[in-house]
Image (cartoon, helix red, strand yellow):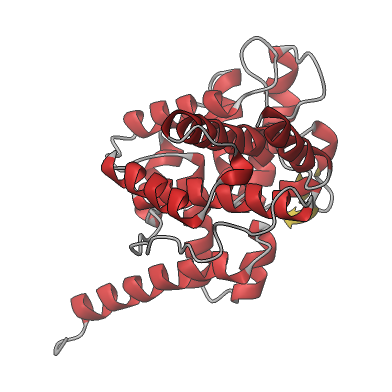
Amino acid sequence: MHDELSGFLAYLRMEKRASELTTKSYEHDLVKFLHYIEQRWNISAAAVSYVHIREYLTELYAEELARTSVSRKLSSLRSFYTFLLREERIKENPLVLIHAPKQGKKLPSFFYEEELSLLFESVNTSTSLGKRNLALLELLYATGIRVGECVKLDVKDFDLYLETLLVKGKGGKERYVPVGSFAAEALTIYMNEARPLLKPADEALFVNYQGKRLTARGIQKMLNKLSTDASINSRMSPHVLRHTFATHMLNEGADLRTVQELLGHSDLAATQIYTHVTKDRLREVYRRSHPRA
C-alpha cells in the first residue's frame, strides 16, 4: 500500500511537475482513504471496487463535508487509480462509474472601484514597509497574479523600461504580463527608496522587515490590516484582488482570451466564470438605472 502511494507521489513530482503544495494535498487525501479501507475492510488499494468507493463517499457526506471538498478528494482518488491502471497494478479503474457531486454556482468575490480607492488611500507610505505595501497592492491589482507567483518574484523579473513582469506560474510555465503605470511607479519608488533600507538577504522583489522573502501568509496579514484601516468589511485576500482584476478587465471590454492569458489559465472555462460576474453587474446597473426595469 505504501509502495503504491510512494510511486504515485513520485510520479506527481517527477512527471507531472506538481508543486509541493499540490503533492501534499494529494498525499493527505490518499493517506486518509488508504487508512479507511485498511481499517474498514482490511484490503489494499488494488483490491478496491466501485462498491468500496461508493461507501467511502457516503462516509464523507456523513461528515458533512462541502461538495467542493468531496470533489477534491474524489479527484485525488481518480488521479491515483489512473496512475495504478497505467502501471498495470490494477485491471479496472473502480472510479469509472463514479461522478463528481454537482457544484452550486458560486461567483467569485470582487471589489468595486470605490472600495479599492479606499484601500489604496489607507496605505501609509511614510515608512519603508508602507511603500512596499502600496507597491504590492498596486501590483496584485494591476496584474491579477496569484499570491504564489507573487512571492516567487525576483528584482530581475520586473522590467521598468517595458513595464512588464515575468511571472513563473503553475507547472513551471512562464508568462509576461504588463504592469500599469500606477503599479510601475509604486514599484520604482519601493525598489529605489524602501527596499534597500529593508536590507534584503537575496534577490527577492518583496521582502519583510527582516529582509527575508515575503511569504503568502505575510501578504495576507498585510492585506487584513489594510482592509481594517480602510474600514472595508468585505473579505480581503490576494485571490479577491485577482478576481477584481479579471472582473474589471471584462467590465471595461477586454476579451476573454486576453484575460485568460493574463491570468495564466490553461483552460478557458476557468476564465468564463468572470463573465457571470459581469452579467450580474450589468443586470444590477440596469435594474437601478432603467425607469421600467
Residue 244, horizontal then vertical, whole percent: 47, 55
Of 244 and 61, nearer the camera is 61
**Between 27 and 274, the one nearer to me in the picture:** 27
Residue at x-position 46% and y-position 50%:
53
Looking at the picture, how far across and down is residue 119, in whole percent? Answer: 41, 40
The x and y percentages for residue 77 are 56, 48
Q: Position of residue 278 (x, y in %)?
A: 41, 71
- Residue drawn at the location 37% of the way across and 76% of the way down: 279
Q: Quadrant of residue 27?
A: top right
- The reply to whether residue 200 is in sight is yes
Number of marks drawn:
0
Can residue 116 be seen at all in this image of the molecule? no
Residue extending furthest toward the bottom = 292
Point out the image quarter for the N terminus. Answer: top right
Q: Quadrant of the C terminus?
A: bottom left
Residue drawn at x 82%, y 40% as measured from the top left: 157
User: Closest to the observer: 197 or 31?
Assistant: 31
* In this rendering, position of residue 268 left or right of residue 126: right
